[in-house]
Amino acid sequence: MEPKDTTTNEAFKGLTNEACPFLPCHKGVEREFNCLFCYCPLIAYECPGPYQVFTDRNGMKRKDCSACTLPHDGYRRSWNFIQRWLERPRIWDGSDQDPKRIKDAPSE
Ligand code: SF4
């Protein structure tokens, strides 16, 4: 049993930082804006988000996640999304996103 299993209070699943000067930093969020995953835990892993790949000044492949709302769209929804994709994390190899993976992104 984990601490989260001992309470019905779900406040740990998300928050909105109304004082942030960048809010809303991603367009298209329809539910509560979840800032908990501002730095997405999936940045180094395979994910179903619509990222673009670019090469930084050190020659490293990076994800540009500007178009992704998955970690932000609703407290419970984004919490569940992140937990599910961290259950079996696979290291991202720097490849472009597969359009099929975006299409198959879970809706809950
Ligand atoms: S595309 Fe979305 S889910 Fe994937 S790493 Fe970026 S913000 Fe996270």
Image (cartoon, helix red, strand yellow):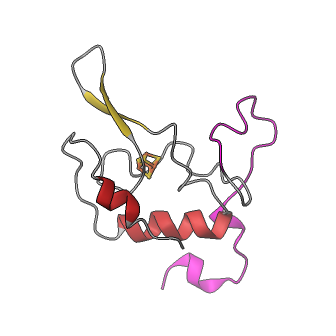
Q: Residue at x 72, y 61 (%)?
A: 31
Q: Residue at x 74, y 50 (%)?
A: 16
Is 4 included in the stretch rendered in magenta? yes
Q: Is residue 13 left or right of residue 107?
A: right
Is 93 included in the stretch rendered in magenta? no
Task: Examine the image and state in which quarter residue 86 appears.
Answer: bottom left
Q: Residue at x 31, y 20 (%)?
A: 56
Q: Main secondary structure of the magenta part?
A: loop
The one of 86 and 97 positioned closer to us in this rendering: 97
Q: Is residue 77 left or right of residue 99?
A: right
**Farthest right residue in view:** 19
Q: Is residue 92 left or right of residue 75?
A: left
Where does residue 19 sit, x and y in percent of width and height? 81, 36
Quadrant placement of the C terminus: bottom right
Range covered by the magenta-colored residues: 1-28
Task: Please tell me whether residue 64 is drawn above or below residue 56 in the rendered image.
Answer: below
